[in-house]
Amino acid sequence: MNAGTVYEKVVRPLLFSIDPERAHHLAIGLLRRASHVNLALRLLQRFQLAAKPKTVFGVTFPNPIGLAAGFDKNGVALPALAALGFGFIEIGTVTAKSQPGNPKPRIFRYSKEQALINRLGFNNDGADIVANRLRRWRESGRWPTVPVGINIGKSKATPLDQAPADYLHSFRRLRKFADYIVLNVSSPNTPGLRSLQERDALASLLRAVWEENRDAKPLLLKISPDLSVAELAEIVATCEEHQIAGIIATNTTLDHSSIPSDTDQPGGLSGAPLREKSTALVRFIAASSAIPVIGCGGIFDAESAREKIEAGAALIQIYTGFIYRGPGLLREIVAGLE
Ligand SMILES: Cc1cc2nc3c(=O)[nH]c(=O)nc-3n(C[C@H](O)[C@H](O)[C@H](O)COP(=O)(O)O)c2cc1C
């Protein structure tokens, strides 16, 4: 049995037999422990993939498939995730203050639809603790050789009109560890966050961060799939005015039309039902702007990965597909790249 089959036949049935958030803790706990053990890292490296290097916004990626934000929110498992073969890893969302997130249960599986709904609400250790952890990874010599992106968002307790200061705190604490920084203005689970995508609010956030960006770290914006064409066009224009290095399209959707109403749950939907919508956004941005796009949403196989790249994505990210298909998905996508 190859690694992909082992995951789908053995590991996934075990993980899927327990509550989704407990399964996540189990998986990230194992990867965290493996991150400290050389032998374990060498075993994971058996997944290592052919190099398909690509340089985007000045950063060179060994392959164009990244792990999307939310899987390793606190940066606890960077070495193991790199050993699995990801071309880059995005940690976060990290907020200025540590916060517990919403009450549990808050992650729901929809296996038939190959989807997840989550309303975690940015549970994370906060920028100060994460920065210390990242410093320790650096000092330990285990810092991954692949690029690391850091995704930052607004603390729930911070009023929306003080959002720029909240992002700035995280930006100042974390930028030195990041190959790129993502401003997340698109999680549906922090009340009001998506309104930061509106023109004036977005412009003041981008201006505030840019003024602090002395070492010109690539600054990316992660957007919602639930935008109208007019809203999207306005966001792209604002990004161009503020030298945004890349756009991540997309976060989870509030469109639950693919989910049977008797099992539906509030939160952001990810996975297969998001695929077309996120591809449409990638296509629109790539056609209307030179800003590089990271395509994310519903990538489950080589074909859906190719779809994002053909729509104009420079890089892609996976999350739900990785939960359903494991590390074999990475191998399959890399093998299918030109
Ligand atoms: C359980 C879960 C937690 C997530 N947490 C975050 C997060 O903290 N920050 C963020 O920007 N996106 C987060 N996401 C969104 C993913 O990064 C990704 O944008 C989205 O799931 C679409 O990709 P997918 O269909 O491959 O999952 C989360 C997704 C899931 C399923």
Image: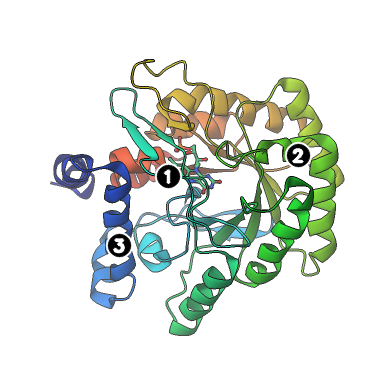
Label 1: few (<14), some or many (≥20) within 10 Å?
A: few
Q: Which of these two is toward me, 319 or 15?
A: 15
Quadrant position of residue 193? top right
Precedes in sequence: disc 1 or disc 3: 3
Residue 195 in percent (x, y) is at 72, 36
Residue type at tag 2: Ala
The residues bearing labels 1 and 3 have C-alpha atoms spaced at a distance of 21 Å
Can you identify the residue that label 3 sits on?
Answer: 29
Using a 10 Å C-alpha cutoff, classify the residue at mark 3 as few (fewer than 14 neighbours), some (14 to 19) or many (20 or more): some
Residue at far bottom of view: 139
Amino acid type of the residue that numbered disc 3 sits on in the rendered structure: Gly
On screen, residue 47 above or below 215: above
Who is closer to the viewer here, 204 or 263?
Answer: 263
Instruction: Give, as a three-letter code, the residue at label 1.
Output: Pro
Identify the residue at image location x=81%, y=65%: 212
- Quote the CA–CA distance across marks 2 and 3: 40 Å
Q: Residue at x 30, y 42 (%)?
A: 20
- Residue 121 appears in view: yes
